[in-house]
């Protein structure tokens, strides 16, 4: 079983400690919502799990691979394998503007997995259908709405056949209707058994789809439990203060 085990991870940028002795264990197939105020360390933690950020202390194990402190993603021997296990999706889509939706999804399977063009195309079309974009395969990013771009980004991450996805506030730049279409896709992926670690301010999604809600503040995990407990009956005053400012 592929667990994500984060042990006593700390990370500073200059004099500012962004992660402060963070420990979490996430089981295969779980959906975990990371919530908390801006600057709490949520995105840094997500990027550290994926090997995109180095960290100063502790270790992160993803399945059989271990990420160690003070190693860049170029130097850490497990980072490439970890990124095969977990795809990462960003707020700003990061699609290639000169490629169609289908070509964006095909790119990594062709260049990294060395799939033939025909096999990559077949996989890409199936994944675009899976995220509800079968009819937009030939569209370029400029011709897509924000929600459609994010769904292409999800299909692109799935093209590498990962065991899970790391989602970094992927709906925060979208209008409410477009947010909904992206969150529906994530809920379907949860039902398919993927491990999802989602940085989000969408408390409705966290309540509906997450197995656990993890509250971060000032670089520390201050609350961790089922959505009904963390969102409805938070124990910590900092969590209560944060949730009082959110529409849940």
Image (tube, rainbow, N blue to C red):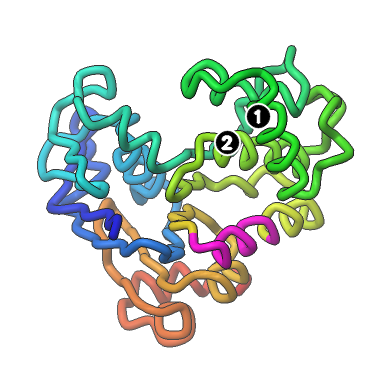
Image quadrant of residue 71?
A: top left
Tell me how far mark 2 sits from mark 1, CA to CA. 6 Å
Place of residue 38 in the rendered image (x, y in percent of width and height, measured from the top left): 45, 49
Closer to the camera, 45 or 41?
45
Asked which quadrant contains residue 138, the reply is top right
Q: Nearer the viewer, residue 170 or 98?
A: 98
x 20%, y 39%: residue: 11
Identified at 62% across, 42% down, the residue is 154
Residue in front for this viewpoint, 101 or 126: 126
Which stretch appears magenta?
Answer: 184-193
Displayed quadrant of residue 156: top right
Q: Which residue is mark 1?
A: 105
Rendering coords of residue 127 (x, y %)? 69, 42
Above or below residue 224? Residue 48 is above
Q: Residue at x 82, y 37 (%)?
A: 145
The quadrant in which the N terminus is found is bottom left
Above or below, 207 relative to 89: below
Q: Secondary structure at mark 2?
A: loop
Q: Position of residue 28 (x, y in %)?
A: 36, 61
Q: Given contact means CB atoms under 8 Å apart, are the residues at marks 2 and 1 in contact?
A: yes
Residue occupying the far top of the picture? 98
Left or right of residue 173: residue 90: left
Q: Is residue 191 magenta?
A: yes
The residue to which callout 2 is attached is 159
Prevailing SS of the magenta stretch:
helix
């Amino acid at each position: 079983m592929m667990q994500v085990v984060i042990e006593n991870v700390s990370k500073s940028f200059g004099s500012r400690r962004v992660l402060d002795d963070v420990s979490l264990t996430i089981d295969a197939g779980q959906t975990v919502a990371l919530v908390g105020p801006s600057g709490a360390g949520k995105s840094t933690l997500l990027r550290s799990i994926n090997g995109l950020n180095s960290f100063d202390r502790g270790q992160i194990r993803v399945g059989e691979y271990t990420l160690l402190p003070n190693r860049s993603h170029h130097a850490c021997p497990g980072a490439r394998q970890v990124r095969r296990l977990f795809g990462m999706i960003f707020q700003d889509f990061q699609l290639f503007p000169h490629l169609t939706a289908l070509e964006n999804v095909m790119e990594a399977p062709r260049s990294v997995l060395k799939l033939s063009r025909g096999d990559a195309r077949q996989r890409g079309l199936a994944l675009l259908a899976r995220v509800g974009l079968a009819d937009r395969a030939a569209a370029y990013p400029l011709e897509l709405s924000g929600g459609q771009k994010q769904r292409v980004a999800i299909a692109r991450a799935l093209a590498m056949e990962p065991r899970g996805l790391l989602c970094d506030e992927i709906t925060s730049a979208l209008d409410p209707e477009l947010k909904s279409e992206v969150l529906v896709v994530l809920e379907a992926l949860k039902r398919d058994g993927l491990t999802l670690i989602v940085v989000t301010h969408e408390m409705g999604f966290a309540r509906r789809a997450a197995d656990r809600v993890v509250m971060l503040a000032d670089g520390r995990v201050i609350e961790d439990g089922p959505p009904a407990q963390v969102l409805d009956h938070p124990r910590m005053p900092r969590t209560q203060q944060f949730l009082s400012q959110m529409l849940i």
